[in-house]
Amino acid sequence: MSPKKEPHVLLVDPNGETLTTLYSILDQEGCQVATSHPDNEALRYVAAHKPDVALVGRHPDDAPAGFLSQSIERLSPRTRILLFDPSQPWRRESSFVQDLVRRVKETV
């Protein structure tokens, strides 16, 4: 049996603090993590690297998250897109974070 692959995750959110916190948590959980703001940089990354998961921060009335998700789907149909609410508490022990980590790890 081959060892389980580390999930390759792209975190996308305009808030640097959210990116830093989630990066730290997912990195400690054994994920290969890259970060990006929700712009063309994120799409270039997806086209070049085809991550297993794209975690996209969804903000109230955020049309770009929907557009970004559709663009990611087009560029990399195998990339699983998970929208998350960046207003959630980012403590490792919170059920929200534990659920997010579990969902990421289920992709591989």
Image (cartoon, helix red, strand yellow):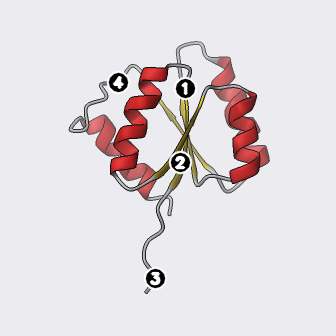
The numbered mark at residue 88 is 4
- The label nearer to you, 1 versus 4, is 1
Mark 1 and mark 3 lie on one chain; the one further toward the N terminus is 3
Residue 99 location in percent, x, y? 33, 44
Question: Which image quarter holds the N terminus?
Answer: bottom left
Mark 4 and mark 2 lie on one chain; the one further toward the N terminus is 2
Distance in Å between CA atoms under marks 3 and 4 = 35 Å
Distance in Å between CA atoms under marks 1 and 4 = 13 Å
Mark 2 residue type: Val
| Residue 54 falls in image quadrant | top right
Visible residue check, residue 85: no
| Direction from residue 65 to residue 99 in the image, left or right | left
Mark 4 residue type: Gln
Mark 1 and mark 4 lie on one chain; the one further toward the N terminus is 1
The numbered mark at residue 9 is 2
Q: Which residue is mark 1?
A: 13
